[in-house]
Image (cartoon, rainbow, N blue to C red):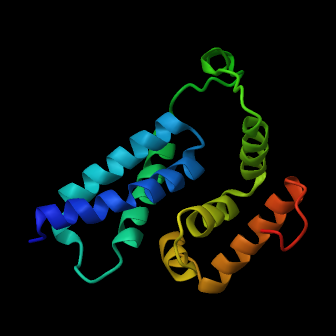
Amino acid sequence: MVDRHCWREAVTRKIPSLRAFAWSLSRNSADADDLVQETLTKAWTYRDRFEAGTNLRAWLFTILRNSWYSSVAKRSREIADEEGRHAARLTAEGSQEWTVELHALKVALDDLPPEHREAIVMVGAAGLSYEEAAEIAGCALGTIKSRVNRARNRLAEAMDMPRGAY
């Protein structure tokens, strides 16, 4: 049995990186929050299945990723707001200058192939090692390195950054 206090502390420290990864998948703050909450609930429910001494972050990211794919399957049966009328009414214009660059980054991330976006967020934003990211993505180490490199190059190009400036 895992000590509840230690478990809670260890998992709580992972929430920011879980949230970043969830946002990279959903590209929506509310959906990302829901996904993290679902991940934490599942992790707590199945904490006895976690093998002490193994990689907690990779275990949590795998739960999150699997939850995302399950939610995508469920959503495929929902009616979408294809014209964005409802979503447009819910957005507010930002007033700070940084919102322009943040928007450009979001657009650049959206333009990446999903597997490249997932890889760059796991390694670049969540701070996972290449090995951890490869394990979570279920691919070879060289594949994840290639995806991250291609994503970095495309983001740098989209953001008008010189190569190597990242």
Above or below, 30 against 129 in this view is: above
- 3 to the left or right of 25: left
Residue 64 visible in rendering: yes
* Looking at the image, residue 82 lies above or below residue 113: above
Residue 76 appears in the figure = no
Displayed quadrant of residue 11? bottom left
- The quarter of the picture where residue 143 lies is bottom right
Residue plotted at (51% across, 33% down): 77
User: In the rendered view, would you say 137 is above or below 34?
Assistant: below
**Residue 150, position as x, y percentages in the image:** 78, 70
Count of all numbered marks drawn on residues in the image:
0
Q: Nearer the viewer, residue 98 or 59?
A: 98
Q: Residue at x 16, y 68 (%)?
A: 48
In-image side of 153 versus 43 (left or right): right
Residue drawn where x is 75% and y is 56% of the image = 112
Point out residue 79 in the picture as x, y percentages from the top left corner.
56, 25
Q: Quadrant of the C terminus?
A: bottom right
* Residue 51 image-quadrant placement: bottom left
The single residue placed furthest to the front in the displayed view is 96
Q: Provide residue 117's location: percent of width, then percent of height.
A: 67, 59
Horizontal and vertical percent position of residue 21: 52, 56
Q: Residue at x 64, y 76 (%)?
A: 144
Question: In the picture provided, is 130 more to the left or to the right than 47?
Answer: right
